[in-house]
Amino acid sequence: MSDISTNGSRRYVPRAQSRIRLDKFTSDDEMCVYCACGRIVALDRKEMQLKISLGKELQCTACRNHRISAEIDYLNDLFDGKTDEECY
């Protein structure tokens, strides 16, 4: 069976499944982190150890972006006078 599929007159190679192997996470440069949302993410070990030493939560990119967006929305509301600083 060929890996090439046809769609009408077009031919394409279907997108491959994730090729990340579990033994990839044993690299000295990466560490495997469980995010609060349930994702398992391979992140740079030195950066994550720095965040741990600073007491920060380790997050996947999606959760980090969501948190930053919420913080920006809060600051915008604070600047516009829609919320009090004590509410946060």
Image (cartoon, rainbow, N blue to C red):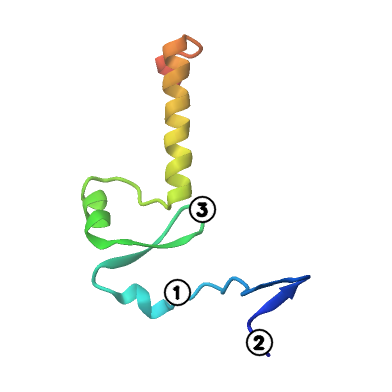
Disc on the earlier residue, 1 or 2: 2
Residue 16 drawn above or below residue 58: below
Q: Which residue in the structure is indicated by mark 1?
A: 20
Dot 3 corresponds to which residue? Answer: 37
Indicate the amino acid at tag 1.
Ile
Mark 2 crowdedness (10 Å alpha carbons): few <14, some 14-19, many ≥20: few
Tell me which amino acid carries mark 3. Cys
Is tag 2's residue or tag 3's residue first in the polypeptide sequence? 2
Q: Quadrant of the N terminus?
A: bottom right
Which residue: 48% across, 14% down?
Answer: 83
Say what secondary structure mark 2 lies in: loop
> Could you say which is closer to the camera, residue 28 or residue 19?
19
Q: Which is more toward the observer, 3 or 28?
A: 3
Q: Nearer the viewer, mark 1 or mark 3?
A: 1
The answer to the question of whether label 1 and label 3 lie on touching residues, with beta carbons closer than 8 A, is no
Quarter of the image where the C terminus is located: top left
